[in-house]
Amino acid sequence: MSSKKRAAEDDGVPSKAVDRGQATARQGAVQEEMGEFEDRWEDEIEDEVVDGDAMEDEGDEFTHAPEDEDAPEPRKQTYLPGVVMGPNEQLVADNSVYPCLHALSYAWPCLSFDILKDELGTDRTGFPQTAWLVAGTQAGDVPGHGRAKDEVVVMRLSGLSRTQHDDDSDAEAEDDDVDEDAKLDFLTFPHVGAVNRIRAAPTSATIPDPYHVASFSETGKVHIWDVRPLIDTLSGPSKPRQKTPVHTITAHGRNEGYALEWGRSGLLTGDVDAKIFLTTLTPTGFTTSQAYTSHTSSVEDLQWSPAEPTVFASASADRTVRVWDVRTKSRKCAVSVRAHDDDVNVISWNRNVDYLLVSGGDEGGVKVWDLRMFKSKPKPVAHFTWHTAPITSVEWHPSDPSVFAASGADDQVTLWDLSVEGDDEQAGAAPLGPDGNALDVPPQLLFVHQGQKDVKELHWHPQVPGMVVTTAADGFNVFKTISV
């Protein structure tokens, strides 16, 4: 995917840290914008009182409305993108499908981020929650002030509370974990050039010092930072921190890139000139290898194998997914498969089933691959065409081997479960599309989340089951759904 595709449109500077706390969707149902919903067909009511007795005295007929007759409630149905709405229908948010939903914004769009492992424990299910992120800005131009300075930002999102529903009991509504505004605290490093992609190094049970993060700049340089001092400062008393990277990779020259991935064997970086480099940490410092060359167009994404530390996969604008082994002296790929009919933008390797890989293409398709079939029958085991614009991010659930999430330039974030089978009764009750025919809703589609504009990246929180964090041109969303 080119830089033009990923660049954000800057309509000004939003507020620093605002939690709108509004629901943006129901399960399989979404609202198109954050905010309150109003009835645009509501009639204006004037303050005029009519006295029935007075009308009777004047000889006019006056009939009182029946008191026992209840007005029927309007029929509710699920909304999906593409559903045709009637002239008197409106979207109403259903908060009950979100155990947790928050929206926060930063001063500049952060179109790439990663979740930092913290020391607050694993499998956290209570509320409120705290999440640590590292993000990179794409500030762009400020009218009348020239180019704004970009940053690497370490964020602490605290007070991520349970969403209050209309049907919550009074006792539940008084709980401390309900309907609180989330808070965004942050510290920054200055960064030369917009941040195309940012990734945090994997950590062991004890978070190491330093805590390395890599950022790929639009200038073509890859910087490695130690963000541990920022984490410590946000967690407690202020500590001295260095504002320069601990190492800079210059092997890409002036070729920018978007592919960046840490693994046990080192840091992989891929650029628009179709080259891939491996940088490793040695006793004498960081060392970058010679280029891995097989792709014929921009390298868009990279993923290490969860089972074999020397094997990785790459996605490219040449429409292929390739598998490599860093032990190969030729630096050529071992396997190549034409995965999509357009650019392959993103891939994700299943951490629980190491032969499954999901890919997302510029045509909007999402495909699931069995890597064991790459050499003999390279056909996807699943192919979903729900999204109507380029796929911008995909990621497998950290613990459920059949669930993954995807985001697209159609402003949708979708959750999928490969283990779900079709139901004939549900198929017959499918909502109607613009052409009057039933929408082809895949049974594996669990949830559709909307409300953000230009969604660029998503990640599952590895320590808070079911929590998804997304970033877009208008800020971050943090949510959990009842479907996962």
Image: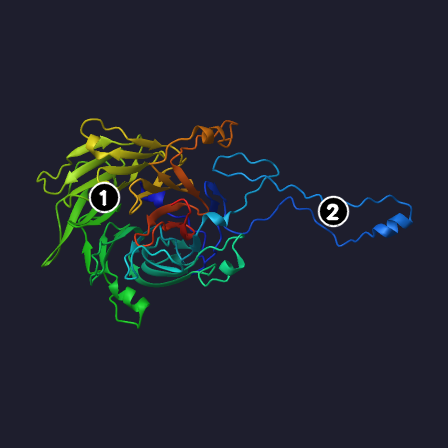
Neighbour class for label 1 at 10 Å: few (<14), some, many (≥20)? many
Q: Quadrant of the C terminus?
A: top left
Is residue 271 at all visible to an observer of this figure? Answer: no
The residue sitting at 62% across, 38% down in the picture is: 88
Residue 162 or residue 239, whichever sits in front: 162
Secondary structure beneath dot 2 equals: loop
- Residue 376 lies left or right of residue 403; in this view the side is left
* Residue 340 sits in quarter: top left
Q: Is residue 103 above or below residue 297?
A: below
Return the mark for residue 78.
Answer: none
Q: Position of residue 386 (x, y in %)?
A: 40, 34
Distance (Cα) linking label 1 and label 2: 67 Å
Neighbour class for label 2 at 10 Å: few (<14), some, many (≥20)? few
Q: Amino acid at mark 2?
A: Glu
The residue sitting at 64% across, 44% down in the picture is: 41
Return the mark for residue 67.
Answer: 2
Q: Position of residue 424 (x, y in %)?
A: 44, 28
Q: Which residue is mark 1?
A: 303
Q: Is residue 288 above or below residue 323?
A: below
Residue 416 or residue 240, whichever sits in front: 416
Q: Quadrant of the N terminus?
A: top left
